[in-house]
Image (cartoon, coloured by chain):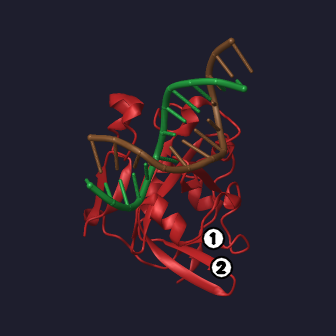
Chain colours: A red, B brown, C green
DNA sequence: GGAGTGATGACA
DNA sequence: GTCATCACTCCA
């Protein structure tokens, strides 16, 4: 079973999408080579009230993709060095996204974007085969009991309520 | 624990 | 135009 996930899948509740992304495959096509990586760790950023989300500052030139249709990539540079890969989720006009933090053997959002050569040129591009970066369901199912949750990483500035939300999802090994 | 790094957004 | 901030990684 190989199904390319589209707006219909991503336009649902961000927390549901984030959890269901575990076990899906991130597929990268560079030239003729096509490689698929199991998604192992994600974080949800849900709505403009979420103080850890870029969307909490309102719509700006940078975070504009978060307000757009689901199923698009939101890629930005942080700390002057690392590109972060996010999938836009939720309905149109509702700012939300899921940060892809780990795929395959790669641990850490900055490491995986470097390994897969994911750059800001992909920002605001649709996740499909034409773009060269998309997500597939290949029939892998992660058991509910194997999924762990924790607060998100690197968002202490968001204040006690939002910094503590268990919006990070990953597998129990 | 602390440096490196540069785009971004807020303010003037 | 200036300035502080930042969804990270690596080395000590």
> Spatial distance from mark 2 to mark 1, Cα to Cα?
9 Å
Label 2 sits on residue? A30
Rendered location of residue A84, percent (x, y): 54, 55
Rendered location of residue A25, percent (x, y): 50, 74
- Mark 1 surroundings: few (<14), some (14-19) or many (≥20) residues within 10 A: many
Q: Which mark is residue A106?
A: none
**Chain label for disc 2:** A
Rendered location of residue A10, percent (x, y): 57, 57
Label 1 sits on residue? A133
Mark 2 or 1, nearer chain start = 2
The quarter of the picture where the C terminus of chain A appears is bottom left
A101 relative to A84 in the view: left or right: left
Label 2 vs label 1, nearer the camera = 2
Residue drawn at (35%, 40%) of the image: A165
Residue drawn at (55%, 48%) of the image: A80
Q: Nearer the viewer, residue A143 or A83?
A: A83
**Number of marks in picture:** 2
Residue drawn at (39%, 74%) of the image: A105
Rendered location of residue A122, percent (x, y): 68, 61
Residue A71 higher or lower than A53, as above or below: below
């Amino acid at each position: 079973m190989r199904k390319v996930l589209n707006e219909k899948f991503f336009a649902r509740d961000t927390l549901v999408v984030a959890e269901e992304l575990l076990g899906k495959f991130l597929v990268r096509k560079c030239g003729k080579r096509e490689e698929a990586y199991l998604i192992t760790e994600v974080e949800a950023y849900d709505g403009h009230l979420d103080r850890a989300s870029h969307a909490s500052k309102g719509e700006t030139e940078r975070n504009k993709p978060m307000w757009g249709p689901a199923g698009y990539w939101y890629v930005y540079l942080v700390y002057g060095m690392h590109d972060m890969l996010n999938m836009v989720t939720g309905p149109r006009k509702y700012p939300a996204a899921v940060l892809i933090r780990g795929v395959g053997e790669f641990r850490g959002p900055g490491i995986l974007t470097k390994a897969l050569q994911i750059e800001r040129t992909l920002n605001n591009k649709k996740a499909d085969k034409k773009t060269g970066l998309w997500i597939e369901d290949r029939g892998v199912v992660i058991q509910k009991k194997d999924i762990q949750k924790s607060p998100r990483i690197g968002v202490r500035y968001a204040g006690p309520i939002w910094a503590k939300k268990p919006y990070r999802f990953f597998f129990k090994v």
